[in-house]
Image (cartoon, coloured by chain):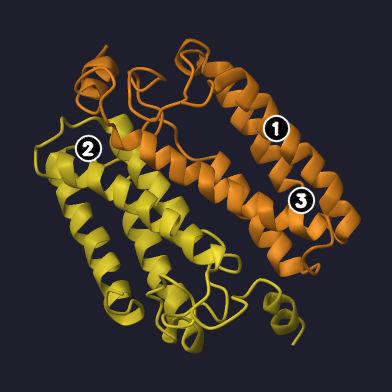
Chain colours: A yellow, B orange
Amino acid sequence: MCGMVATAGFAASHAGGENKSVEARHHQMQMIAYHTGILGGIAKGEMEYDSAMVDAAASNIASLAAMERATLWIEGTEQGAAADSRAKPEIWSDAEGFAAAFEDLETAASAVVGAGDTAAVGAGMGDIGGACKACHEKYRGPEN
Amino acid sequence: MCGMVATAGFAASHAGGENKSVEARHHQMQMIAYHTGILGGIAKGEMEYDSAMVDAAASNIASLAAMERATLWIEGTEQGAAADSRAKPEIWSDAEGFAAAFEDLETAASAVVGAGDTAAVGAGMGDIGGACKACHEKYRGPEN
């Protein structure tokens, strides 16, 4: 109850209104996309294999997946209620499943730290991409 | 030497060109700004004190400050060399100092986890703001 009252102060003030948390989680997603782009580029041979880059990209994806959700996924910011949001209501009604989906990404990304060659990065990218896709299918709505 | 060769594949292809790492670190900075906005809002009494929000915001700032820099601060993406960049060359010529500046932010943010009231958040925000300012003064160039 305390949490509900308090988060109200962070929520969109009216239906369809802007909410900075939506923008913030888009930044989070863009950072994840940037880093998966590096791993994907290496896996496809479009970028040179570089262990420091692989480890940094994988580690950063894991950190981004592990971000605390309280500030980012604020109640009342689902698609339709907050501008630019594609968040499905299931993010809040199935909070455990949503947490598990992010944990799957964190696990997949962490496993790529230390990937010794292009093939290993490619295999790891399969799991990372699978985690992205599974979460988007379950918790992301259609384009606005 | 190996790192220099490899990072060349990630660098801007020509002077003043776009480089995705610049955009990615802007996302990082925007996420830090979003979370310091929450802590600042609480410190100023504009937002209701909420321990879950305080802890999440502080923890996320610490994680963002601790991001691996290899993928984000790529050589050849300083101000003037890459579009939209305000990164000073000192980021690379004084890499240890730059790392220490991010560590100062990480330390200041971590200290706010568990801040028990508005006053404690305000005190912590002083240190976080100080870390932001110190780093910007030393490593960020003028507006483009």
Q: Is residue B113 left or right of residue B141?
A: right
* Residue that label 3 marks: B112
Query: Quadrant location of residue A117?
Result: top left
* Residue that label 2 marks: A116
Give residue A120's position: percent from left, percent from top.
Answer: 18, 46
Q: Secondary structure at mark 2?
A: loop
Compare residues B121 and A107 and report the one nearer the observer.
B121
Compare residues A126 and A27 and report the one nearer the observer.
A27
Task: For residue B73, say whether it is visible.
Answer: yes
Residue density around tag 1, few if under 14, some if 14–19, many if 20 or more, within 10 Å: many
Query: Quadrant location of residue B138?
Result: top right
Q: Please tell me whether residue B38 is drawn above or below residue B127 in the rendered image.
A: below
Give amino acid for label 2.
Gly
Chain that bears disc 2: A
**Spatial CA span between label 3 and label 2:** 38 Å
- Residue B131, label in figure: 1
Residue density around tag 3, few if under 14, some if 14–19, many if 20 or more, within 10 Å: many
Task: Please tell me which of labels 1 and 3 falls first in the chain.
Answer: 3
Q: Is residue A132 left or right of residue B94?
A: left
Q: Secondary structure at mark 3?
A: loop
Give amino acid for label 1.
Ala
Q: Is residue A86 left or right of residue A36?
A: right
Residue at 31% across, 46% down? A34
Residue at 36% across, 67% down? A104
Give residue A118's position: percent from left, percent from top.
Answer: 14, 40
- Can you tell which of label 3 and label 2 is closer to the viewer? 3
User: Which quadrant, please, contains the N terminus of chain B?
Assistant: top left
- Can you tell which of label 1 and label 2 is closer to the viewer? 1
**Spatial CA span between label 1 and label 2:** 36 Å
